Amino acid sequence: MKKLIAIVLVAILAAAGVAYMVAASDNADDGLVIRYDDYISYSVFAGEPASAAGSLELVTVGSTEYVWASDIGFGSLLFYDGTELEYDVKKANLSVYMIAGQSNGAYSVERSDPSMIDNIAPGTAYWYGAARPGQGIIENNSIQDMIDLSSGEALIGGLDAPLAAGLVDDAKVLIVNTAVGGTEIASWIPGQTQYERAKSLFADALTKIDPRFDVTVKSYIWSQGEADSLTSIGTYKAYFLLMHDSFTSANEFSPVPLKAAIIVQTRAIDGINSSIAQAELPTLSNTVFMGTKITQTFTVANGLMNEDDRHYTQAGQIVVAGDVSIKIRSMNL
């Protein structure tokens, strides 16, 4: 059989509109290089693969057929015309982000609508948290793909999925959600209930990441403030900085510190103190950034707030995620 060693193969994951570059290794004799858990659509090949071996498998997700990099190491594809392509599957890059705060950050099965999420490809975005679709509130989940690998439909909605979709690039994305509805910022300072719970959950997530990923811990998204709308501005800022300093210091919240805080400014409901404090926080630390103020424009009438006028709709979360992901990408956070 003739083995074709290509120089560059561009795999376009049609299901998500996300482009992946599959480049040759430094030594052409090693074959092509792709990354663990990549899904390569058949449509990029001149012919249809007949079989796969080694680190590659042929799979179907929904109605789309893929070559899946199921392991690291060498794998090959045999086509019906006798052509063989060899791949050296390498470890994948994985960027880890954390969501913290209260209910507009927390994952809620009831307020999530995964059917509105149509721009995530399989093998690009993962989720870990304390809520799981159809299973209520549980702790210490296994890390899961945000896509149902049989139907091809999104499993996760909320802020998590559109945020991940906006952050996927040459690295895959894991969202660790530690937010809890109704929590005040006082419970997020070191030693308090939500801080300790988030610390445990984040640590557990890091230990459960497959060793076939090269991990980079990135920033955290802070979506909170409704419970502190009447808390004094000074108190809110002081508590936030206590939490933030620990989140971003090595061997305090995590052995690998989070890089920065990205704030989703709370929509003022009963009072405006927390919203004002959040606007001032970026002036007090060079690792605190305002991710978006767009929530101030959300209303029930424009479809971005639920009927309770306190929680963002899935459409609202998509808008928030769009702003936040742009901020993170523009500043490499």
Image (spheres, rainbow, N blue to C red):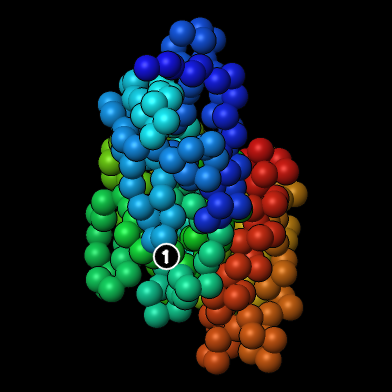
Q: Position of residue 202 (x, y in %)?
A: 36, 47
Does residue 138 sit above or below 128 in this rendering?
A: below
Q: Secondary structure at mark 1?
A: loop
Q: Is residue 262 above or below residue 4?
A: below
Residue 138 showing in the rendered view = yes
Amino acid type indicated by mark 1: Glu
Q: Residue at x 34, y 56 (%)?
A: 149
Residue 186 horizontal/vertical position (percent): 46, 63
Residue placed at 70% from the left, 52% from the top? 326
Q: Position of residue 331 (x, y in %)?
A: 71, 41
Q: Quadrant of the N terminus?
A: top left
Q: Going by the image, does 306 lie left or right of 283?
A: left
> Local crowd at mark 1 within 10 Å, few (<14), some, or many (≥20)?
many
In screen coordinates, is 317 left or right of 125? Answer: right
> Residue at the location (63% across, 81% down)?
304
Left or right of 168 on screen, residue 141: left
Quadrant housing residue 251: top left
Residue located 64% across and 65% down the image:
320
Q: Nearer the viewer, residue 312 or 60?
A: 60
Q: Is residue 103 visible?
A: no
Q: Does residue 313 lie above or below 250 as drawn? A: below
- Work out which quarter of the rendered image holds the C terminus and state it: top right
Choose top left, top right, bottom left or bottom right for residue 324: bottom right
Please identify the residue farthest to the front as the structure is shown: 81
Indicate the position of residue 262 as horizontal and vertical percent values.
62, 52
Which of these two is toward me, 204 or 6? 6
Which residue bears the numbered disc 1?
153
**Of 274 and 130, the residue lying toward us:** 130
Q: How many marks?
A: 1
Compared with 240, 212 (above or below) is above
